[in-house]
Image (cartoon, rainbow, N blue to C red):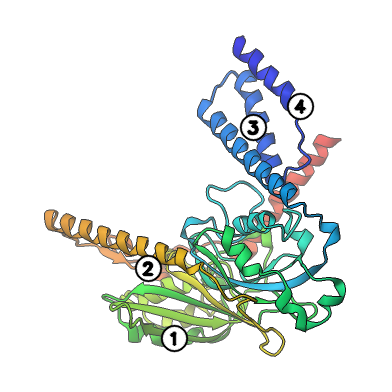
Amino acid sequence: MAIKMTMNSASKKRAFSDYSGWNRDQLIERIKLLEDSQGLYINNEVNVDRAQKRVHESAKERKEAKKIRKINKQRGIDFSKYETRHIALKFSYLGWDYQGLALQGLPTDRPTVEEVIIKALQQVRLVQSPNPADFLFSRCGRTDRGVSAMNQVISLRVRSRLTKEQLEDPANDNLELDYIKMLNHVLPADIRFHAICVRPPKGFDARFSCQWRQYKYIFNSKGLDIDRMRKAAQMFVGQHDFRNFCKVDGSKQLKNFTREVYSTAIESLEQEPGFSVFDLKGSAFLWHQVRYMVAVLLTIGQKLEEPTIVKDLLNINMYPCRPAYKLAHDIPLILYDCGYDPQTVKWTAGPSRKYVSHLALDGLTNNYKVKSIVVEYMQKIVECSIPQKMDKTIVNLGDGAGQVCCKFIHYDKRQKVEPPEVTNAKWLNRKMKHVQHKMEEDS
């Protein structure tokens, strides 16, 4: 009874809280917390750990929001007194500690890269709102959890220190805020901005103005026939229907799976003996397309499939839907570069060029190298103590461990995933049922 009274008292207190400064994600968390609190006593099912975690997360978010408001107040920045300008920024990030690049509508186990960047933009007062649509935010290419990028590009509208008249003259650009330095100062070491275009052409959009994307996939080439892989990789070049090299998302209702690959290459990494890199460039790529392409190439390198399997999978009459094969590992994949019209999009390092942000990267590099050495020590000790005996097939997935199977089943004998048309129809059907159910509830 005492506990219930405490919760009721707390609920009354929360009812008078000021939520006007909260963003969408914070409000969603607050709603979930309140729903959980009611469920604890109405259903008499106490989930203390979950409730405490939510309380802790909400308190942390409130603390961060309060800190940002305090900084804003101290700086006394009134956005109505400043002009804004549309810019494009290039940056790198290590993706393995993030839940992908794109900002998510719901809370995620790990932060996304964009979530961290948008908080940084607010912290240094380059944007006023946490809503990307309010400052015309656009990204070149979306990367999944674990995937890194070296030259990812975003475009957005940010606060300027120049007057309206000064913005009209490119000669004043060296007087502008040092956007790169400001952001790198508050970002973690695994996200680094390194180039800027302060005057992109009219109508520029990081996504739709991009002319090509380049990906690299690093893999251990031990036991692989690289010549077979190169022969197969060349079959990807050109315009093809890549439905058998992607994952279908019903919510996108995608019907066109044709993409163009401009070039492919597999080369040895000189600085890392025993490792190779699959390099490809194309107009755009489907969800998980590169990782599915790599998965097939690795089976060819192991001589589990013939190089011609690539040509067969690109023939949708022969394979109207994808065989159920495993996706290649995410960590080795890198969005290496994005291409724009060099005549209209000019990249620079910003006005000052006096950065110390790579010192943080030096520390990060040192930590990872030391960890690698420690793991190698452990591997040698374990291998000496426990002799290996493996009489099964290990399918290379690019993660070093692979998939253990008694017998490799060729793609033409495998169960097939459902065709994209079926996936799209199922999603639409569920959506319609949900809408109909909601309309019945409202009536």
Question: What is the three-letter code of the residue carrying label 3?
Answer: Leu
Answer above or below: position of 177 versus 43. below
Check disc 1 and report its element: helix, strand or loop.
strand
Q: Earlier in the sequence, mark 2 or mark 4?
A: 4
Residue placed under numbered mark 4 in the picture? 15
C-alpha gap between disc 1 and disc 4: 61 Å
Check disc 2 and report its element: helix, strand or loop.
loop
Front-most of 253 and 83? 83
Q: Are marks 2 and 3 in contact (CB under 8 Å)?
A: no
In-image side of 384 versus 291 (left or right) = left
Label 2 vs label 4, nearer the camera: 4
C-alpha gap between disc 2 and disc 3: 40 Å
C-alpha gap between disc 3 and disc 1: 51 Å
Question: What is the three-letter code of the residue carrying label 1?
Answer: Ala
Residue 398, label in figure: 2
Answer above or below: position of 304 versus 121. below
Residue placed under numbered mark 3 in the picture? 33
| Residue at screen point 61% across, 10% down | 2
In-image side of 246 versus 399 (left or right) = right
Residue placed under numbered mark 1 in the picture? 265
